[in-house]
Image (tube, rainbow, N blue to C red):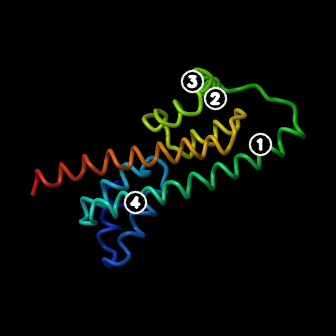
């Protein structure tokens, strides 16, 4: 899948490659960190690749958070609570233990930001706090992988 995304970005005219990187950053499991790296490998300047992938990831996360908040608001007032699946119970336990900052910063090692942010909102976390910490996390992960990709590319060349 990553090779396909990389080829897609590389096939675009130079002026549209940033848009391709932003689209890659919006894909769950690719996000800002792999989107940044893919952009850099294709030849987009590192700062531009990190910014584009980060913007794409933030926009997709915002859509998911706002949708989850809207759904939670409607469901909360109209339905009785349903039993949690074992996977959801485990995620809730992690949320209770680490809070929004911990889950936002560390959650991307296991799940995409879109899934973790929607889960936190569904658990009752403030959507504004989730958005703030997810943006911080997305930027940090994007910059980290951008730096690593830049170092890797300059060693190979």
Q: Nearer the viewer, mark 4 or mark 3?
A: 4
Q: CA distance from mark 4 to mark 2?
A: 32 Å
Relative depth, front residue between 131 and 155:
131
Decide which of tag 2 and tag 3 comes sooner along the chain. 2
Which residue is labeled 2 in the image?
A: 88
Dot 4: element: helix
Q: CA distance from mark 3 to mark 1?
A: 20 Å
Which residue is labeled 1 in the image?
A: 72
Which residue appears at 68% of the width and 39% of the height? 121
Please count the marks in the image: 4
Q: CA distance from mark 1 to mark 4?
A: 31 Å
Indicate whether 60 appears above or below 19. Answer: above
Quadrant of the rendering where the N terminus is positioned: bottom left
Asked whether disc 4 touches disc 3, contact meaning CB atoms under 8 Å apart, the reply is: no
Which residue is labeled 3 in the image?
A: 94
Asked whether disc 3 touches disc 1, contact meaning CB atoms under 8 Å apart, the reply is: no
- Specify whether 31 is left or right of 127: left
Circle 4 Cα neighbour tier, 10 Å, few/some/many (<14 / 14–19 / ≥20): many
């Amino acid at each position: 899948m990553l090779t396909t995304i990389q080829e897609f970005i590389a096939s675009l005219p130079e002026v549209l490659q940033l848009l391709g990187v932003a689209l890659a950053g919006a894909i769950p499991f690719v996000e800002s960190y792999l989107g940044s790296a893919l952009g850099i490998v294709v030849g987009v300047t590192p700062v531009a690749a990190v910014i584009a992938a980060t913007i794409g990831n933030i926009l997709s996360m915002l859509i998911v958070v706002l949708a989850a908040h809207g759904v939670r608001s409607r469901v909360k007032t109209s339905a009785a609570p349903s039993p949690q699946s074992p996977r959801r119970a485990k995620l809730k336990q992690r949320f209770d233990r680490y809070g929004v900052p911990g889950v936002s910063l560390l959650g991307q090692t296991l799940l995409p930001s879109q899934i973790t942010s929607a889960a936190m909102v569904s658990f009752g976390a403030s959507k504004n706090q989730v958005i703030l910490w997810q943006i911080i996390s997305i930027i940090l992960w994007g910059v980290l992988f951008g730096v690593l990709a830049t170092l890797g590319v300059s060693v190979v060349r």
